[in-house]
Amino acid sequence: MDDPPGERALTPSQPPLIPDGLDATLVFVRHGESTFIAEDRFQGQAETPLTEIGLRQAALVAERLAAPHAAPSLPVPAGPPLELVHSPLRRTAQTAEAIDAALRGTGWAVSRRPDPGFAEIHQGAWQGLHRDEVAARYGPELAAWRTDPLTGWAPGGESLPVVQARVRPALATILARLGEGRPPGSHDRPQVAGYADEPSDQPWSVVVGHDGVFKVALLTLFDLPLDRFWMWSMDLCAITVVELRASRPVLRAHDLTAHLAPLQAEQGPSATDTAETATEDRSRSGAL
């Protein structure tokens, strides 16, 4: 398979991703349901807006982030986030706008900016196609993508090294801003959550993005190989929290969705079961 334009791997000469001694927290939020997800289509970087359900999901995750220490508390520091960064694609921008509005409703004026580094993985010829059509027309390529995403991906789309090459500097910018003007932290303190002297005055930022690009972001933060791409998964409008303890990444929470319970209650048990089945089927299909 030909590599897409701009193919390049990360090089050992790159500076460290995480500033030395950084104490901070990153919160990752996936966007809400989009029209292509509802239609069971591969979307990648296609511009797909949120559905009515997606808008409701965005409102609920926004409410959760505007009151992060309401029970059950999210593992984030006190005070407002430093900034709200999001993929420029419409479905993520709409989700970020809902979060921004909720934060401002609490009196928190937070800087918001798009960053193309967090756009979803481009899925080339598959974008816009129903998953059954992708399976019928691109069976071998799809099988390779599901099995070994380092050697197989969508024709005309992005390979994982290409995605990592744009995700890494996007992460580095956020982390550098979190560390500006702050003294380095130390590992000479309790490393187990729950102790009373656990710091609460550290900065934190929110990133709104996509399942595929977040898989790459987490592998990059934890210095894991890209062939473990399928080890991570994020549900729609789920929350993942990564703390940096003196530059050491710690996964504090992953794929939290309890804040979506009101929507699930409104839809009823049968609708919830249907949505969960659809999410599992879509994940197995390899659609992003």
Image (cartoon, grey):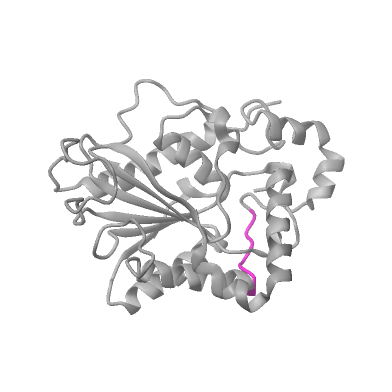
In which quadrant will I find the N terminus?
Answer: top right
Q: Position of residue 224 (x, y in %)?
A: 46, 29
Residue at (80% x, 44% y) in the render: 134
Q: Which residue is at the front of the view, 255 or 183?
A: 255
The majority secondary structure of the magenta stretch comes to: loop
- Report the front residue among 228 and 104: 228
Q: Give the answer, above or below, for where 84 lies relative to 246.
A: below
Q: At which x and y percent is residue 176?
A: 26, 44
Horizontally, residue 14 falls left or right of residue 202, namely right
Please give left or right for residue 186 compared with residue 88 in the image: left
Q: Which residues are magenta?
A: 46-52
- Give left or right: position of 89 versus 247: right
Which residue is depicted at the point 80% across and 31% down?
140
Which residue lies at the image location 63% right of the left edge and 28% below the top edge? 3
Whether residue 176 appears in this view of the structure is yes
Is there any visible trace of residue 6 in the rendered image? no
Determine the image quadrant of residue 160.
top right
Tell me if 194 is positioned left or right of 186 in this view: right
View extreme (right): residue: 136
Query: Total label count?
Result: 0
Observer-nearest of 138 and 243: 243
| Quarter of the view holding residue 77 | bottom left
Residue sitting at the far top: 12
Residue 235 inside the magenta-drawn segment: no
Q: Position of residue 94 (x, y in %)?
A: 51, 67
Q: Position of residue 192 (x, y in %)?
A: 28, 43
Looking at the image, which residue sits at the far front?
195
